[in-house]
Image (cartoon, rainbow, N blue to C red):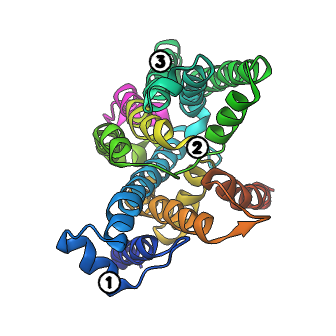
Amino acid sequence: MNRWLVPLLALVLLAAALASLLAGAVWLVPGEAFASLFSGKADLPGLIVGEIRLPRLILSIAIGAGLGLSGAVLQGLLRNPLAEPGLLGISAGASLGAVIAIYFGFAAGFALAAPLFALIGAFVTATIALILARSGGTLALILTGVAISSMAMSGVSLALNLSPNPYAAYEIMTWLMGSLTDRSWEHVRLALPFILPGLLLLLLTGRALDALALGDVQAESLGVPVARTRLLALLGTALAVGAGTAVSGTIGFVGLMAPHIVRPLVGYQPGRVLMPAMLAGAILVTLADIATRTLVFSGAPLNVGVFTSLIGTPFFFWLVLHIRRRTA
């Protein structure tokens, strides 16, 4: 199964991508949609696919890949099956940055202000986590991430409490729920230059994660640069997850679910989980985005972050019970 897992996941992702280009409020016929897209005609199907759904699809794949891969790396690095990107406070830092842009009115004057501020917030929190946990090991990194996340979310709560008007509060809440609606090529150009290097840095940790499964001391005795691996994981997560959160808002539980979905199929070896988890994360976010466009409740569509939370919460409880049974 290991041999065919990555090609199989790639085919599933391709099918989900094709469905994403066709699904929505206006359903498109495959032949007409792709003919219009590649012919360059400025007709309705070509505009819908080329200007609305294609950038949204690229972002869903890139963001999902970053979440899935970073979740797999952090679970291997921290040797904690419940670890996920939000554990380091990077998602919370990005959220605080976007909230600052919305609260002080920068987003009203400049469309990309919220993503840019979110990106800055992600890198600031990642830098703080790296400095504070530089010589303290894995436990210090976890505690630092929890502290930073708590502080950042306190700032978000304060902004909501002191919001100057209900429209700002609504915009903040909408952004925090995570969405790919109305994302354009400008968002793609902003996020991809950070997400792609982040994915590369995270993939470079594969061999070291196999050794780290034995423990930090044992890995160092085998010649594995533990501090360097920790740095690669933190920088890769900051780039991939920070940039993704910057353009989409918070999309939770994908980094937790994707590694656990594929881990039984690769023999529980941390290094082998990375590529399948990256593809699984991309599939999850792409399918969630399709669902939010096609499922409407009480006349309003769901946000991607809300949909992944609805799926991820029961998955989290199942995972906790599963771990309890294994350790009992």
Say few, some or many: other residues with alpha carbon within 10 Å of mark 2 (under 14 / 14 to 19 / 20 or more). many
Q: Where is residue 52 in the image (x, y as percent from the top left)?
A: 40, 59
Q: Quadrant of residue 249?
A: top right
Say whether marks 3 and 2 touch (CB < 8 Å). Answer: no
Magenta segment boundaries in residue numbering: 213-232
* Foreground pick, 204 / 97: 97
Q: Residue 84 has which mark?
A: 2
Are discs 2 and 1 less than 8 Å apart at CB? no
**Number of marks:** 3
In this view, the mark in front (2 or 1): 1
The residue singled out by tag 1 in the image is 32
Q: What residue type is labelled 2?
A: Glu
Q: Give the residue at x 46% y 32%.
A: 115
Foreground pick, 263 / 148: 148
* Residue occupied by mark 3: 124
Callout 1 amino acid: Glu
In percent of the image, x 51 and y 74: which residue is there? Answer: 26
Q: Which of marks 3 and 2 is nearer the N terminus?
A: 2
Q: Quadrant of residue 12?
A: bottom left
**First in residue order: circle 2 vs circle 1:** 1
Q: In this view, does 35 lie to the left or right of 296?
A: left
Can residue 42 be found in the magenta stretch? no
Q: Is the magenta stretch mostly helix, strand or loop?
A: helix
Q: Is residue 285 above or below residue 84?
A: below
